[in-house]
Image: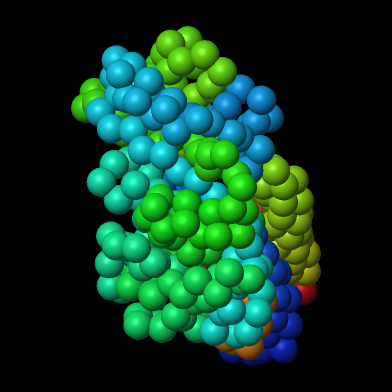
Amino acid sequence: MNIALLEMRRAKLRFGLLSVAVALLVFLVLFLSTLSGALIESFTGAIKNLNADVLVYSSSARDNIQGSRLNPTVTAQVADVPGVASAGGIATTTTSAQLPSGKGDLALFGFDPNKAGAPGGLKEGRLPSATNETAVDIAGATIGSTITLLPTNIPLKVVGILSGAQFSAAPTAYVDLPSYQAAIKASNPNVPFIPLNAIAVQTEPGADPATVAGQIAKAVPGTTGYTIPDAVAKIPGVSSVSQTFGILVGMTFVISIVVIGFFFLILTVQKMRVFTLLRATGASTGRLARSVIVQITAVVIVASAVAVLLVWGALKGASSGIPVSLDPTLVLGTVFAVWLFSLAAGLLSIRRIRSIDPATAAGAR
């Protein structure tokens, strides 16, 4: 260990440049992972964090909640299916609204507060329980403020602040079904009835959601049941975004490992004569290998610390309109993975050390 640290002190520029290169690569991995996670959450949070195990759409919806239309009477039919503990209607539309940041699009959800389908991610306040109350996932909204639906000028009093409850990356508000129906009626007075877009289902304890979803599709004509993960995966655009960012993050991660591995392999080759002399004086392969491991660990720790600071600064300065935060679990997992695979790449260096013949020390210079 002393040999490893002594060498790093004497070759500050060499190891400093490597640390900077690795820090930039780890920064890209963390930043892209954080950004992709936040983007996907902003598309899917309204579905992913529902208080439900199963979602029921109409058979003609093409796996999309916005394309689903269900008669409200279907809720009672779904509730009668074996394995269903609670069933509640969900309706959604996109409308214009006066938001804290000005006029803009708003994803409006109606739900039954007493049944399955309530939004998750409540940070502050409570869920709406009376007419024209709302819980929102909107930047700048506060408890007691008002969101005004346009062009009907219906005011919604904010009683709850949600996190991770957006849909389609748009500001999102949740109201009870009577308030939702009143808002739709106000803008479309001649509509015969207001359909539901989905029915949220809580399964009975011990029941398999996938099995219950299949039973609902068989028992209730014109419907299709999905588990929540399946419904999230089928939201348009989510798969493409996930795959694109996955490829970018994977390539960046592989490049990081290759850079570290080849650096230490080249460094070992350059120091082969020194290692040969150390072997001849009694240094074991394990001791020399530990020096490589210490250097890899030191580089990864320093680079990761710099990368985390860079990501934190980048996220603080970002103004994407999407709530983005650095997940400690993601940081620890990424750093550990980089360190682990870097050690694996370092085995190439250790293998070269192991092949050194101490008898050649007489010719080493």
What residue appears at the point 36 percent right and 68 percent down from the top-left corner? 133
Query: How many numbered marks are there?
Result: 0
156 relative to 140, above or below? above
Residue 77 seen in the current view:
yes
Residue 310 visible within the image? no
Taking depth in this image into account, of 227 and 26 the one nearest to the observer is 227
Q: In the image, what residue occupies the spot 44% across and 21% down?
A: 213
Q: Position of residue 62 (x, y in %)?
A: 68, 30
- Image coords of residue 131 (percent x, y): 34, 63
- Residue 143, picture quadrant: bottom left
> Image check: 260 left or right of 177?
right
* Residue sitting nearer the eye, 328 or 206: 206
Quadrant hosting residue 267: bottom right
71 relative position to 263: left or right: left
Question: In this picture, is 345 found above or below 361?
Answer: above
Name the residue at the left extreme: 205
For this orientation, the residue located farthest to the top is: 218
Q: Nearer the viewer, residue 283 or 153?
A: 153
Quadrant of the drawing holding the C terminus: bottom right
Tell me: residue 149, above or below residue 63.
Answer: below
Residue drawn at point x = 78 percent, y = 69 percent: 270
For this rendering, which residue is in front, 57 or 241?
57
In the figure, is residue 82 to the left or right of 29?
Answer: left
Coordinates of residue 352 in the picture (x, y in percent): 69, 52
**Is 158 situated above or below 330?**
below
Residue 283 rendering spot, x and y as whole percentages: 51, 63
* Quadrant in the rendering for residue 119: bottom left
Name which residue lies at 27% across and 67% down. Answer: 126
Colouring of the image: rainbow
